[in-house]
Image (cartoon, rainbow, N blue to C red):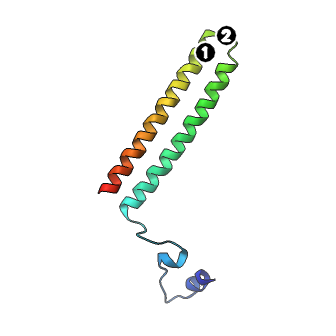
Amino acid sequence: MNIINTILAATTKISPGDIGLSGQVGTGDAILANVLNAAYFWAGIVCVIIIIIAGYFYVTSAGNASTVKRAKDALMGAIIGLIVIIFATVITQFIIGRF
């Protein structure tokens, strides 16, 4: 109800506290951190999906050497991708936290 009253009152400004936000909102570091965290999250989701698909190809390969190689290559690439994402997250959190 407080938000509706604030929005309807033309003479008052909405502060971050009025809508449930606190701290520094909209700073460059916070925006960058949010964008990078979203990118890392979605990249991780893609890697997990690739791991599931590679596992499916491996299980259903029926001994076909080319399908097994394709599945192993996809699995290795996805695992390396997850490791890179984890390191990128740690490094960016460290850098954003320091400066």
Count neighbours of disc 2 (C-alpha within 10 A) and say few if under 14, some if 14 to 19, many if 20 or more. Answer: few
Classify residue 9 as left or right of residue 64.
Answer: left
- Asked which secondary structure carries label 1, the reply is helix
Answer few, some or many: residues within 10 Å of disc 1's Cα (few below 14, many 20 plus, some between 14 and 19): some
Where is residue 52? Give x, y as percent.
63, 31
Residue 26: % across, % down: 42, 66
Q: Callout 1, which amino acid?
A: Val
Q: What residue is shown with label 1?
A: 68
The image quarter containing residue 2 is: bottom right
**Residue reaching furthest to the left:** 99
Asked whether 98 or 9 is in front, the reply is 98
For the C terminus, give its image quadrant. Answer: bottom left
Which quadrant would the N terminus be assigned to in this image? bottom right
The residue located at (68%, 20%) in the rendering is 59
Q: Earlier in the sequence, mark 2 or mark 1?
A: 2
* x 52%, y 79%: residue: 18
- Residue at horizontal 41 percent and vertical 60 percent from the top: 30
Kind of residue at badge 2: Gly
Assess whether mark 1 and mark 2 are in contact (beta carbons under 8 angstroms): yes
Could you say which quadrant of the image residue 87 lies in? top left
Q: Which mark is residue 63?
A: 2
Does 91 sit above or below residue 66? below
Q: How far apart are the two marked residues, 2 and 1, measured between alpha carbons? A: 7 Å
Question: What SS does tag 2 mark?
Answer: loop
**Which circle marks residue 93 in the picture?**
none
